[in-house]
Image: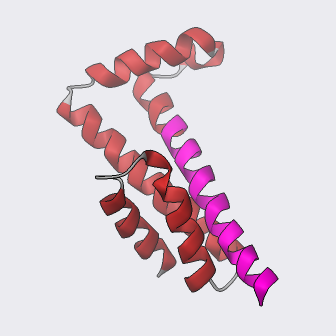
Amino acid sequence: MPFIIILVVSAIAQLFLPWWVIAPIAFLVGMLKSKSAGSSFFAGAGAIATLWIAYALYLNISSDGLMLTRIGNLFSESLKFLKNIPYSISFFVIMALIGGLVGGFSALAGYQFKQLVK
């Protein structure tokens, strides 16, 4: 249930608010709905990673891959190990990691805050 709540509320909020709004949303859901530390982390990480991968896929389809090629060029210049990986795969991995870590640790922090106050 926390996965769905984080996914839906974050998707709606990111239409109008900046990207970092995912952190307070995941924190609140982790605090109010999670039953364990592991489930809160994986719900937050999975929901935000899924959301950002879906958005990256939408951007890729709507720009015929041009945007991902440009972003891939940007990252491959500074991160040499990415030169051997196709740009679209590296972009999706980077999006999933950044979003997943922010969402996961925010939800975990919310759960830990609930345990602290309890």
Q: Is the residue 29 above or below the residue 21 in the image? A: below
40 left or right of 11?
Answer: right
> Magenta segment range?
94-118
On the image, the x and y values in percent for residue 15 come to 29, 52
Q: Quadrant of residue 5?
A: bottom left
The number of discs equals 0
Magenta segment includes 43: no
Toward the top, the furthest residue is: 77
**Split into 4 quadrants, where in the image is the C terminus?**
bottom right
Q: How is the image coloured?
A: secondary structure
Which residue appears at 66% of the width and 72% of the height?
110
Magenta segment includes 104: yes
On the image, the x and y values in percent for residue 6 come to 45, 69
Q: Is the residue 1 above or below the residue 50 in the image? A: below
Which residue appears at 33% of the width and 45% of the height?
55
10 left or right of 32?
Answer: left
Q: Is the residue 36 above or below the residue 73 in the image? A: below
Which residue appears at 51% of the width and 45% of the height?
96
Camera-side residue: 57 or 18?
18
Q: Quadrant of residue 71?
A: top left
On the image, the x and y values in percent for residue 24 come to 54, 63
Toward the right, the furthest residue is: 116
Q: Is the residue 46 above or below the residue 1 in the image? A: above
Magenta stretch, overall SS: helix
Camera-side residue: 105 or 72?
105
On the image, the x and y values in percent for residue 11 come to 34, 59
Camera-side residue: 116 or 79?
116
Which residue appears at 63% of the width and 62% of the height?
106
